[in-house]
Amino acid sequence: MKIAKVCKEWDLNFNIELKSEEDTSLHSRSYIHYAAQHTELVACKSWATKWLLEDIVDSTKEYNVREYMAGIGVQTCIIQNLFKVKKHIVSELDEGCVEHLSNTNFDPKPEVRFENAQESLMEDDSSNLKFLDLPNSSILQIEKKWKDGFYKLFDSNPELVVWTDTSVTYPMSLHGEKYSKLLSSPSINNKEEYVDSYSKWLYNKFGYSIGRAAFRARNAVYFAAIPGDHKTESKSFPVKETEDGFYFIGEERKTLDSFF
Ligand SMILES: C[S@@+](CC[C@H](N)C(=O)[O-])C[C@H]1O[C@@H](n2cnc3c(N)ncnc32)[C@H](O)[C@@H]1O
């Protein structure tokens, strides 16, 4: 077993036997292997997520939590350490991740489901805190592929909805015009205008706004939406300043690659 330290504070156990996927096509490799190749992004994600969630809701209250794309459980670990979790349901489409999530040291032990989020998002769910850690998406995918499921997240009036957006991977000049049409904004020329327009659109549609936006390196932003009209607090997490966000105890200089 290997133990990872998340945000220099919390342990995440890895009991799974990882096999090389050298012979598997890049497209079919599991998230565990993506994470193995981009440990610096997992570390950066850890600090960004901690900042995103800390005290965003009343941390003295108990919550039911639903995560639709739980991957290797970094977000699960942070959620369980920041909030009092009563019931936690996590799901994944990757068998290796499901095995890992079922056999690690979460407390309380989550209900782990092997499920396609496209389908499970359509089921009624009354959890207080909801998480959709999409692999890649912008408002374009939210308004197309994920539209029905994303809209349904808000049906039960959760206290918090968190999701991942990767629009910032590309210069805003590439899709800014398409984004502005979807978000009913006169123009979107930079990431700040994107977040601001997204938050206003969200408020007009669901009565929620983006309370916090945590930029992970140059390729993702995590949104935390809360009920009401709020001014978004944003923070950037560069890779160079976040390398200690995720490492294996005793192997601080090594990365997840050392598994293989
Ligand atoms: C960004 S990663 C999640 C990382 C994870 N939250 C963590 O903290 O370790 C995205 C995950 O979504 C999963 N995924 C992609 N499409 C899915 C779908 N349709 N249903 C469920 N999971 C899906 C992938 O297997 C991948 O593990």
Image: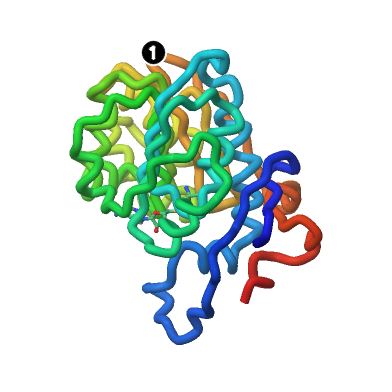
Q: Which residue is label 1 attached to?
A: 228
Residue 18 in the image: x percent, y percent?
Answer: 54, 71
Q: What residue type is labelled 1?
A: Gly
At x 25%, y 45%, the residue is: 146
Q: In this view, does 155 lie above or below 34?
A: above
Residue 136 occupies quadrant: bottom left
Residue 259 or residue 139, whichever sits in front? 259
Position of the C terminus, as image quadrant, is bottom right
Disc 1 is placed on an element classified as loop
Viewed as shown, does residue 219 lie left or right of 1?
A: left
Q: Is residue 258 above or below residue 190?
A: below
Q: Which residue lies furthest to the bottom in this view?
A: 23
Task: Say if disc 1 is inside 8 Å of ligand 1.
Answer: no
At x 59%, y 66%, the residue is: 36
At x 31%, y 17%, the residue is: 207
Residue 124 occupies quadrant: top left
Other-residue count near label 1 (Cα within 10 Å), few / some / many at <14 / 14–19 / ≥20: some
Viewed as shown, does residue 114 lie left or right of 7?
A: left
